[in-house]
Image: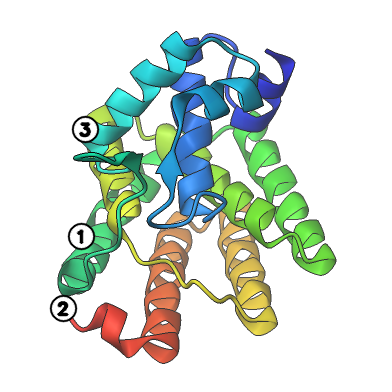
Amino acid sequence: MALLRQESGQMAFKTKQDQVADIIRARIISQTYPRGMKLKQSDIAKELGVSITPVREALHMLGAEGFVQAISHKGLIVPLVQADTARETFELRVVLERDLTARALERLDATTLAALRESQRVIAALADGGGRFASRTENYRFHFRLYELAERPQTLQFVRVLWARYPFVTQERGGTRLKNIEEHERFLSLVEAGDKAGAVDAMVAHIESGWNDLLASDPAQAAG
């Protein structure tokens, strides 16, 4: 249970099912569980030190969100990205994440800002040490710690679905990781300066920067 709470990075009031789902989402987004990988309930339960039941329930929830897919005679897999919908997914991310960011900043307190700062420190440390998968996982936590403050559960759910379908850059270069850190730093600096509008614009620019990196690294992925 300690490993479950540590990796999920979530509050203790979340159910075990929700904590397991958070971990699996983060592992898929970070590509710890790569696209096309078969997911075995027993293996995940063993890794997390939990019973099969919360894993099964979490995977059912993630199937509805699009993070996992049931394939006949194969079981559950991490679905492949659909390149023909990538641009639409990106454009929807911009609209919804702009709204979540603006609303979250109206509720941001010192505790959450400190958590975002700590997340940024971890991302920077992992980037320096080459922890690619762990860095991506922490990046996911950075964004959703912020977005959860918006208190817009349906929008948050839609954004999770979009992240499940988004073709994040698969081969991060050192410069890309450093740019990600710099963009987070600009966002946090504007928040700390009290410039909420500027911070929202910085978040949108951060999302657009990731899209441009995708276009540069694999134009076919973003052809839709």
The residues bearing labels 1 and 3 have C-alpha atoms spaced at a distance of 19 Å
Numbered circles on residues, count: 3
Q: Counting residues from the N terminus, which is met first, the one under dot 1 or under dot 3?
A: 3
How many residues crowd mark 1 within 10 Å: few (<14), some (14–19), many (20+)?
Answer: some
How many residues crowd mark 2 within 10 Å: few (<14), some (14–19), many (20+)?
Answer: few
Secondary structure under tag 3 reads helix
Q: 89 and 202: which one is in front?
A: 89
Hey, what amino acid is under mark 2?
Gly
Q: Which mark is residue 92?
A: 1
Q: 108 and 13: which one is in front?
A: 13
Colour mode of the rendering? rainbow
Q: Is residue 105 visible?
A: no
The C terminus sits in image quarter: bottom left
The residues bearing labels 3 and 2 have C-alpha atoms spaced at a distance of 23 Å
The N terminus sits in image quarter: top right
Q: Which residue is mark 3?
A: 64
Residue 119 screen position, x and y as percent: 68, 46
How many residues crowd mark 3 within 10 Å: few (<14), some (14–19), many (20+)?
Answer: few
Q: Seen in the image, is 136 located left or right of residue 98?
A: right
Task: Name the front one of labels 1 and 2.
Answer: 2
Q: Quadrant of residue 214?
A: bottom left
The relative height of residue 108 versus residue 138 in the rendered view (above or below) is above
Marks 3 and 1: in contact by CB < 8 Å? no
Q: Is residue 114 visible?
A: yes
Q: Seen in the image, is 27 located left or right of residue 201?
A: right
Hey, what amino acid is under mark 3?
Ala
In the image, what residue occupies the spot 46% across and 32% down? Answer: 40
The relative height of residue 50 versus residue 164 in the rendered view (above or below) is above
Residue 43 screen position, x and y as percent: 56, 28
Q: Which residue is mark 2?
A: 224
Residue 52 screen position, x and y as percent: 47, 13
